[in-house]
Image: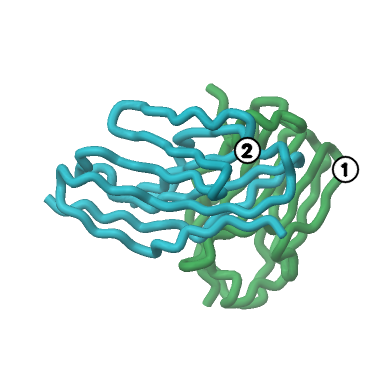
Chain colours: A green, B cyan
Amino acid sequence: EAQVTQNPRYLITVTGKKLTVTCSQNMNHEYMSWYRQDPGLGLRQIYYSMNVEVTDKGDVPEGYKVSRKEKRNFPLILESPSPNQTSLYFCASSLSGDRLYGQYFGPGTRLTVT
Amino acid sequence: AQKVTQAQTEISVVEKEDVTLDCVYETRDTTYYLFWYKQPPSGELVFLIRRNSFDEQNEISGRYSWNFQKSTSSFNFTITASQVVDSAVYFCALKRNTDKLIFGTGTRLQVFP
Protein backbone atom coordinates (compact mmCIF):
# COMPACT_ATOMS: atom_id res chain seq x y z
CA GLU A 1 0.00 0.00 0.00
CA ALA A 2 1.33 3.40 -1.04
CA GLN A 3 1.76 5.52 2.02
CA VAL A 4 3.66 8.11 3.98
CA THR A 5 4.36 7.16 7.57
CA GLN A 6 5.33 9.41 10.44
CA ASN A 7 6.53 8.60 13.92
CA PRO A 8 5.68 9.34 16.58
CA ARG A 9 2.05 10.32 16.11
CA TYR A 10 1.95 12.15 19.42
CA LEU A 11 4.80 13.63 21.41
CA ILE A 12 4.97 15.72 24.54
CA THR A 13 8.38 17.05 25.40
CA VAL A 14 10.10 19.81 27.32
CA THR A 15 11.85 22.92 26.10
CA GLY A 16 15.35 22.27 24.86
CA LYS A 17 15.23 18.51 24.58
CA LYS A 18 16.26 17.49 21.07
CA LEU A 19 13.78 15.42 19.15
CA THR A 20 13.37 13.86 15.73
CA VAL A 21 10.16 13.12 13.87
CA THR A 22 10.65 10.47 11.23
CA CYS A 23 8.98 10.39 7.84
CA SER A 24 9.14 7.58 5.34
CA GLN A 25 7.45 6.99 1.99
CA ASN A 26 7.32 3.81 -0.10
CA MET A 27 6.44 5.35 -3.47
CA ASN A 28 9.93 6.25 -4.69
CA HIS A 29 8.96 9.92 -4.69
CA GLU A 30 11.67 12.48 -5.27
CA TYR A 31 9.92 15.38 -3.59
CA MET A 32 9.30 15.41 0.15
CA SER A 33 8.17 18.21 2.38
CA TRP A 34 7.33 19.10 5.96
CA TYR A 35 4.44 21.34 6.96
CA ARG A 36 3.19 22.64 10.23
CA GLN A 37 -0.46 23.37 10.84
CA ASP A 38 -1.57 26.02 13.30
CA PRO A 39 -5.07 27.36 13.99
CA GLY A 40 -5.97 30.20 11.67
CA LEU A 41 -2.78 29.81 9.66
CA GLY A 42 -3.43 26.72 7.59
CA LEU A 43 -0.46 24.60 6.59
CA ARG A 44 2.90 26.27 6.15
CA GLN A 45 5.90 24.65 4.58
CA ILE A 46 8.94 24.21 6.82
CA TYR A 47 11.48 22.48 4.59
CA TYR A 48 11.41 20.53 1.40
CA SER A 49 13.66 18.23 -0.56
CA MET A 50 13.74 17.80 -4.31
CA ASN A 51 15.85 14.64 -4.10
CA VAL A 52 18.52 12.87 -2.08
CA GLU A 53 20.99 15.29 -0.51
CA VAL A 54 18.98 18.27 -1.81
CA THR A 55 17.05 20.23 0.80
CA ASP A 56 15.82 23.80 0.98
CA LYS A 57 13.97 26.12 3.32
CA GLY A 58 10.28 26.61 3.07
CA ASP A 59 8.32 29.48 4.58
CA VAL A 60 8.96 28.83 8.29
CA PRO A 61 12.33 27.01 8.65
CA GLU A 62 13.58 28.66 11.86
CA GLY A 63 14.24 26.17 14.63
CA TYR A 64 14.14 23.12 12.37
CA LYS A 65 16.61 20.94 10.51
CA VAL A 66 16.11 18.19 7.97
CA SER A 67 18.22 15.66 6.15
CA ARG A 68 17.72 13.52 3.06
CA LYS A 69 20.30 10.77 3.05
CA GLU A 70 17.95 8.24 1.49
CA LYS A 71 15.18 8.78 -0.97
CA ARG A 72 12.51 7.26 1.23
CA ASN A 73 13.28 9.09 4.49
CA PHE A 74 13.03 12.75 5.42
CA PRO A 75 13.36 13.27 9.18
CA LEU A 76 12.51 16.56 10.86
CA ILE A 77 14.86 17.55 13.65
CA LEU A 78 14.20 20.05 16.42
CA GLU A 79 17.55 20.65 18.08
CA SER A 80 16.15 22.77 20.91
CA PRO A 81 12.36 22.75 20.84
CA SER A 82 10.47 25.72 22.20
CA PRO A 83 6.77 26.12 23.12
CA ASN A 84 6.08 28.04 19.90
CA GLN A 85 6.86 24.84 18.01
CA THR A 86 3.84 23.18 19.53
CA SER A 87 1.90 22.28 16.43
CA LEU A 88 0.54 19.56 14.17
CA TYR A 89 3.19 18.43 11.70
CA PHE A 90 2.65 16.77 8.36
CA CYS A 91 5.13 15.09 6.08
CA ALA A 92 4.25 14.84 2.40
CA SER A 93 5.72 13.39 -0.76
CA SER A 94 5.11 13.50 -4.49
CA LEU A 95 6.72 12.64 -7.77
CA SER A 96 8.84 15.59 -8.73
CA GLY A 97 7.41 17.31 -11.76
CA ASP A 98 4.07 15.58 -11.39
CA ARG A 99 1.88 18.65 -11.42
CA LEU A 100 -1.31 16.76 -11.83
CA TYR A 101 -1.46 15.31 -8.38
CA GLY A 102 -1.29 16.87 -5.00
CA GLN A 103 0.96 15.45 -2.40
CA TYR A 104 0.55 12.32 -0.37
CA PHE A 105 0.36 13.26 3.27
CA GLY A 106 1.36 11.33 6.33
CA PRO A 107 -1.08 10.97 9.23
CA GLY A 108 0.38 13.89 11.18
CA THR A 109 2.42 14.25 14.37
CA ARG A 110 0.97 16.28 17.18
CA LEU A 111 3.82 17.86 19.12
CA THR A 112 3.49 19.65 22.43
CA VAL A 113 6.48 21.47 23.90
CA THR A 114 6.12 22.53 27.52
CA ALA B 1 2.51 36.88 -5.02
CA GLN B 2 1.02 33.44 -4.72
CA LYS B 3 -1.80 33.24 -2.27
CA VAL B 4 -4.92 31.28 -1.41
CA THR B 5 -7.71 32.94 0.53
CA GLN B 6 -10.48 31.13 2.32
CA ALA B 7 -12.42 33.99 3.82
CA GLN B 8 -14.89 31.80 5.68
CA THR B 9 -13.28 30.74 8.93
CA GLU B 10 -16.20 28.68 10.14
CA ILE B 11 -19.57 27.67 8.73
CA SER B 12 -22.39 25.97 10.59
CA VAL B 13 -25.32 24.33 8.84
CA VAL B 14 -28.05 21.90 9.68
CA GLU B 15 -28.05 18.50 8.07
CA LYS B 16 -29.46 18.40 4.51
CA GLU B 17 -28.63 22.02 3.83
CA ASP B 18 -26.41 22.85 0.89
CA VAL B 19 -23.20 24.68 1.71
CA THR B 20 -20.54 26.37 -0.42
CA LEU B 21 -16.96 26.86 0.68
CA ASP B 22 -15.20 29.70 -1.05
CA CYS B 23 -11.63 29.72 -2.34
CA VAL B 24 -9.93 32.62 -4.09
CA TYR B 25 -6.39 32.32 -5.36
CA GLU B 26 -3.70 34.62 -6.68
CA THR B 27 -1.00 33.64 -9.13
CA ARG B 28 0.68 35.09 -12.17
CA ASP B 29 1.40 31.69 -13.62
CA THR B 30 -0.61 30.55 -16.59
CA THR B 31 -0.20 26.93 -15.60
CA TYR B 32 -1.25 25.97 -12.11
CA TYR B 33 -3.24 23.40 -10.22
CA LEU B 34 -5.89 23.73 -7.55
CA PHE B 35 -6.78 21.22 -4.89
CA TRP B 36 -9.23 20.66 -2.09
CA TYR B 37 -8.37 18.61 0.98
CA LYS B 38 -10.59 17.53 3.83
CA GLN B 39 -9.32 17.22 7.40
CA PRO B 40 -11.79 15.32 9.58
CA PRO B 41 -11.57 15.46 13.39
CA SER B 42 -9.16 12.52 13.31
CA GLY B 43 -6.59 14.90 11.80
CA GLU B 44 -5.45 13.29 8.57
CA LEU B 45 -5.58 15.15 5.27
CA VAL B 46 -7.81 13.60 2.66
CA PHE B 47 -7.39 14.55 -0.99
CA LEU B 48 -10.72 15.48 -2.61
CA ILE B 49 -10.07 16.96 -6.01
CA ARG B 50 -7.51 18.56 -8.30
CA ARG B 51 -8.12 20.90 -11.21
CA ASN B 52 -5.61 22.32 -13.68
CA SER B 53 -5.75 25.85 -15.01
CA PHE B 54 -6.64 24.74 -18.52
CA ASP B 55 -9.74 22.88 -17.52
CA GLU B 56 -12.60 25.06 -16.36
CA GLN B 57 -15.16 22.33 -16.60
CA ASN B 58 -17.03 21.98 -13.35
CA GLU B 59 -16.98 18.63 -11.66
CA ILE B 60 -19.50 16.71 -9.65
CA SER B 61 -18.78 13.72 -7.47
CA GLY B 62 -21.80 12.50 -5.60
CA ARG B 63 -22.85 15.26 -3.22
CA TYR B 64 -19.69 17.25 -3.93
CA SER B 65 -19.26 19.71 -6.73
CA TRP B 66 -16.60 22.22 -7.66
CA ASN B 67 -16.95 25.47 -9.58
CA PHE B 68 -13.72 26.72 -11.13
CA GLN B 69 -13.84 30.22 -12.61
CA LYS B 70 -10.60 31.69 -13.91
CA SER B 71 -12.25 35.06 -14.52
CA THR B 72 -12.73 35.52 -10.78
CA SER B 73 -9.78 33.34 -9.67
CA SER B 74 -12.11 31.18 -7.65
CA PHE B 75 -12.43 27.48 -7.03
CA ASN B 76 -15.49 27.02 -4.84
CA PHE B 77 -16.64 23.78 -3.31
CA THR B 78 -20.30 22.92 -2.74
CA ILE B 79 -21.68 20.12 -0.62
CA THR B 80 -25.26 19.26 -1.43
CA ALA B 81 -27.54 17.84 1.25
CA SER B 82 -24.83 18.03 3.91
CA GLN B 83 -24.39 15.29 6.45
CA VAL B 84 -22.88 15.20 9.91
CA VAL B 85 -19.94 13.21 8.51
CA ASP B 86 -19.06 16.22 6.36
CA SER B 87 -18.01 18.08 9.49
CA ALA B 88 -14.33 18.83 9.00
CA VAL B 89 -11.84 21.51 8.13
CA TYR B 90 -11.51 21.99 4.39
CA PHE B 91 -8.39 23.37 2.77
CA CYS B 92 -7.99 24.81 -0.67
CA ALA B 93 -4.46 24.73 -2.12
CA LEU B 94 -2.58 26.03 -5.13
CA LYS B 95 0.30 24.35 -6.89
CA ARG B 96 2.27 26.42 -9.37
CA ASN B 97 4.79 25.11 -11.84
CA THR B 98 6.83 23.78 -8.94
CA ASP B 99 6.17 21.06 -6.44
CA LYS B 100 5.16 23.36 -3.60
CA LEU B 101 1.59 23.45 -2.33
CA ILE B 102 0.30 26.76 -1.02
CA PHE B 103 -2.59 26.33 1.37
CA GLY B 104 -5.41 28.57 2.42
CA THR B 105 -6.14 28.94 6.11
CA GLY B 106 -9.02 26.48 5.96
CA THR B 107 -12.74 26.60 6.60
CA ARG B 108 -14.21 24.67 9.49
CA LEU B 109 -17.58 23.19 8.56
CA GLN B 110 -19.90 22.01 11.28
CA VAL B 111 -22.99 20.11 10.26
CA PHE B 112 -25.54 19.71 13.00
CA PRO B 113 -28.15 16.95 13.05
Label 2: which secondary element? strand
Please determine whether, in this image, residue A26 is positioned above or below residue B98.
above
Question: Type of residue at label 1?
Answer: Glu
Q: Can you give x and y, in whole percent of width and height, for residue B107 in the image?
A: 40, 57
Circle 1 crowding by C-alpha within 10 Å: few under 14, some 14–19, many from 20 = few
Q: Chain of mark 2?
A: B
Q: Chain of mark 1?
A: A
Report whether mark 1 lies on the same chain as mark 2: no
Circle 2 crowding by C-alpha within 10 Å: few under 14, some 14–19, many from 20 = many
Q: Residue furthest left?
A: B113
Q: Residue furthest front?
A: B71
Q: Residue at x 83, y 49 (%)?
A: A55
Q: Residue at x 64, y 47 (%)?
A: B101
Question: Can residue A7 be seen from the camera position used here?
Answer: no
Residue at the disc numbered 1 = A53
Q: Can you give x and y, in whole percent of width and height, for residue B24 in the image?
A: 52, 53
State the CA–CA distance, disc 1 to disc 2.
27 Å
Label 1: which secondary element? loop
Residue at the disc numbered 2 = B33
* A27 horizontally vs B8: left or right: right
Q: Residue at x 53, y 66 (%)?
A: A41
- In the drawing, what numbered circle is on residue B86? none
Front residue of B83/A24: it is: B83
* B55 horizontally vs A10: left or right: right
Q: Can you give x and y, in whole percent of width and height, for residue B95 in the image?
A: 66, 43
Q: Residue at x 72, y 34 (%)?
A: A72
Question: Can residue A49 be seen from the camera position used here?
Answer: yes
Q: Residue furthest top?
A: A1
Q: Can you give x and y, in whole percent of width and height, for residue B58 in the image?
A: 45, 30
Camera-side mark, 1 or 2? 2
Residue B70's quadrant in the figure? Answer: top right
Residue B51's quadrant in the figure? Answer: top right
